[in-house]
Amino acid sequence: MTRTKLYTGIYVVLFVFATVQVLVEQSGGLPYWTAFWVIIALSFVKAVMVAWYYQHLKWEPRSVTFTMFVGLLAALALTTAAAYSIL
């Protein structure tokens, strides 16, 4: 059974987070590192929400979920390292 209300709510939250990320990046009012960490935090939350609901990890065995989160943390570490290399 599809959970239309749930998926629509998650979509709206993801859309709002993406809009906030763009506004943080475009505003220029925040110091660089503050904006950087806000965007990283929002990206992490968005990735977890997508994996949890849209990739159905909520209903998978915990070992599969753990494996996915290890990969997510590795991607986050690589993204952070790439951001430091730009400076």
Image: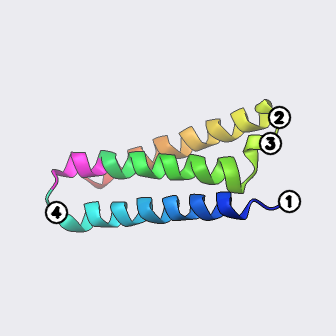
Disc 1 residue crowd, few under 14, some 14–19, many 20+, Cα 10 Å: few
Q: Earlier in the sequence, mark 4 or mark 1?
A: 1
Query: Circle 4 sits on which residue?
Result: 28
Prevailing secondary structure of the magenta residues = helix
Residue 42 picture location, percent across and down: 42, 50
SS for tag 3? helix
Residue 6 picture location, percent across and down: 66, 57
Q: Quadrant of residue 72?
A: top right
Question: Residue at point 23% right, 46% down?
Answer: 34
Residue 57 picture location, percent across and down: 74, 44
Amino acid type of the residue tagged 2 in the rendering: Pro
Give the number of the disc on residue 61: 2
Instruction: Kindly report which numbered mark, 3 or 4, lies closer to the viewer in this rendering.
Output: 3
The magenta stretch spans residue 85 = no
Query: Circle 3 sits on which residue?
Result: 59
Taking the image as shown, residue 33 lies to the left or right of residue 74, namely: left
The CA span between labels 1 and 3 is: 14 Å
Q: Earlier in the sequence, mark 3 or mark 4?
A: 4
Amino acid type of the residue tagged 3 in the rendering: Trp
The CA span between labels 2 and 3 is: 7 Å
Magenta residues? 30-36
SS for tag 1? loop
Amino acid type of the residue tagged 1 in the rendering: Met
Query: Circle 1 sits on which residue?
Result: 1
